[in-house]
């Protein structure tokens, strides 16, 4: 393809580390990947982040900077056969031409099946290839544990406002087609907002804007952007800003107990072709975070929904998603468990590794028993109502309450249960 016929985002793709904009936590001066790239000692890794955050670009730069052969596959169009063919080529090339093993880049690795991911294990483990996988989905869910354990996971963040503006300025200065017009960025808020932190989307919207303006001089204002571009943004919605805005509206509608709004936003996602597992996973998280023990069955319902839609898929999955969304919206709400773990984790960060009380320690050896491990522990089932008053927190945290029951019928019952046993200990 003639480079000038390529989209602006492709024409502006950087080839060197110093030209790479954003992800400063990874490839900045003190970034966790910077020294590895410069030294050429590259582990197999997974680049996880939203669309348009530079995953493919970073993979290309890593290969170029470390002077390694580079192979690329798309999970959408490649199967086990293609994976094995590339691995065979990479193995031969690594042995014959270089002391550094080739890089195999797999875009959208979350779309690979278990068998496809299994086919990568041997090559990664033996060092025939260095795997770089790119994914927009949480690799904990989408990459098999055996492969994930052999990779470092690096999280890419949406571009900041400053990074997006830097992309625009560089495009204006360096791209021959843009330089042929006199472009002045008077306002950028609308462009930044429409991009949703997606660098590729930003540049493609920007090019659409410039090409739709017949004059040789273009003064970019928010009004001009909204007038010229807004009607075309549906082309970018599925993986851009609205991918996150619509699911946010969906979750907030359920949290706010509005079943009608929840079903509407669900329909918007379904009609936009949203991944069925993405929707189900968000409801699974919400069931624990926003409903919790106010209705523990909500978590069971959401988990069953996730399993069902994963098996069935569209179009029938829409019915199951709707049933679950309405059930969650109509459930009593409590974030008490969510708040409790937040408080407990904050306490751990502040107090560090406090010693475990001796009576709670395991004593599998004679030496441990002689040291007092387990001494004084009272087995609750030996006492009336299966309860005996004893301390379970470290000494420094005695009397600390992490869990505060929500104001709903079920958790008020839990509150009564706890207070009946810990009258002087729990502070509700």
Image (spheres, rainbow, N blue to C red):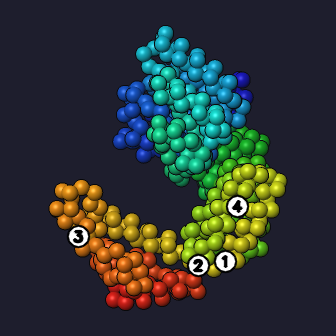
For marks 3 and 2, the one nearer the N-term is 2
Does the image show residue 206? no
Tell me if 41 is positioned left or right of 293 in this view. left
For marks 3 and 1, the one nearer the N-term is 1
Could you give the CA–CA distance between mark 2 and mark 1, rounded to whole angstroms?
8 Å
- Discs 1/4, front: 4
Could you give the CA–CA distance between mark 3 and mark 2, rounded to whole angstroms?
37 Å
Q: Residue at x 47, y 73 (%)?
A: 339
Do the numbered discs 2 and 1 sit on residues whose CB atoms are within 8 Å? yes
Quadrant position of residue 226: bottom right
Report which residue position mark 2 lands on.
294
Q: Residues within 10 Å of mark 3 (few under 14, many from 20)?
A: some
Could you give the CA–CA distance between mark 3 and mark 1, rounded to whole angstroms?
45 Å
Could you give the CA–CA distance between mark 4 and mark 3, rounded to whole angstroms?
46 Å
Where is residue 125? Give x, y as percent: 47, 29
Tell me if 29 is positioned left or right of 82 in this view. left
Report which residue position mark 4 lands on.
305
- Element under label 3? loop
Where is residue 87? Give x, y as percent: 58, 21
- Residue 345 versus residue 372: which sits nearer the camera? 372
For marks 2 and 1, the one nearer the N-term is 2
For marks 1 and 4, the one nearer the N-term is 4
Tell me if 121 is positioned left or right of 8 in this view. left
Report which residue position mark 3 lands on.
375
- Residue 25 versus residue 225: which sits nearer the camera? 25
- Element under label 2? helix
Report which residue position mark 1 lands on.
331
Could you give the CA–CA distance between mark 1 and mark 4, rounded to whole angstroms?
16 Å
Q: Residue at x 60, y 29 (%)?
A: 119
Q: Residue at x 29, y 61 (%)?
A: 362
Do the numbered discs 3 and 1 sit on residues whose CB atoms are within 8 Å? no
């Amino acid at each position: 393809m003639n480079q000038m016929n390529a989209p602006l985002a492709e024409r502006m793709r950087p080839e060197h580390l110093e030209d790479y904009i954003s992800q400063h936590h990874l490839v900045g001066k003190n970034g966790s990947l910077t020294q590895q790239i410069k030294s050429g000692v590259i582990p197999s890794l997974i680049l996880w982040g939203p669309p348009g955050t530079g995953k493919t670009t970073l993979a290309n730069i890593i290969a170029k900077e470390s002077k390694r052969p580079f192979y690329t596959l798309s999970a959408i169009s490649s199967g086990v056969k293609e994976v094995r063919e590339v691995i065979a080529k990479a193995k031969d090339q690594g042995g014959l031409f270089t002391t550094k093993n080739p890089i195999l880049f797999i875009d959208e690795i979350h779309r690979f099946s278990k068998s496809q991911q299994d086919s990568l294990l041997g090559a990664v483990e033996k060092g025939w290839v260095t795997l770089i996988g790119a994914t927009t989905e949480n690799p904990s869910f989408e990459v098999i544990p055996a492969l994930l354990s052999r990779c470092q996971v690096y999280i890419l963040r949406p571009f900041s406002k400053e990074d997006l503006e830097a992309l625009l300025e560089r495009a204006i200065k360096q791209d021959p087609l843009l330089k042929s017009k006199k472009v002045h960025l008077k306002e950028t808020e609308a462009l930044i907002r429409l991009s949703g932190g997606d660098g590729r989307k930003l540049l493609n919207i920007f090019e659409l804007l410039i090409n739709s303006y017949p004059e040789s001089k273009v003064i970019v204002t928010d009004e001009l952007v909204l007038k010229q571009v807004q009607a075309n943004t549906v082309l970018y919605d599925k993986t851009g800003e609205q991918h996150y805005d619509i699911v946010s509206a969906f979750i907030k509608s359920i949290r706010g107990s509005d079943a009608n709004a929840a079903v509407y936003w669900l329909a918007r996602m379904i009609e936009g072709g949203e991944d069925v597992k993405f929707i189900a996973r968000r409801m699974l998280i919400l069931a624990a975070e926003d409903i919790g023990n106010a209705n523990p069955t909500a978590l069971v319902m959401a988990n069953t929904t996730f399993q069902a839609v994963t098996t069935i898929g569209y179009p029938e999955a829409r019915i199951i998603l709707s049933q679950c969304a309405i059930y969650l919206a109509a459930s009593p709400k409590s974030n008490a468990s969510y708040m409790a773990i937040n408080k407990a984790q904050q306490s751990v960060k502040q107090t560090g590794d406090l010693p475990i009380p001796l009576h709670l320690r395991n004593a599998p050896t004679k030496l441990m028993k002689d040291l007092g491990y387990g001494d004084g522990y009272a087995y609750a089932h030996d006492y009336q109502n299966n309860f005996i008053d004893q301390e379970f927190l470290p000494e420094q945290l005695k009397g600390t309450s992490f869990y505060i029951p929500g104001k709903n019928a079920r958790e008020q019952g839990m509150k009564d249960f706890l207070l009946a046993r810990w009258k002087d200990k729990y502070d509700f």
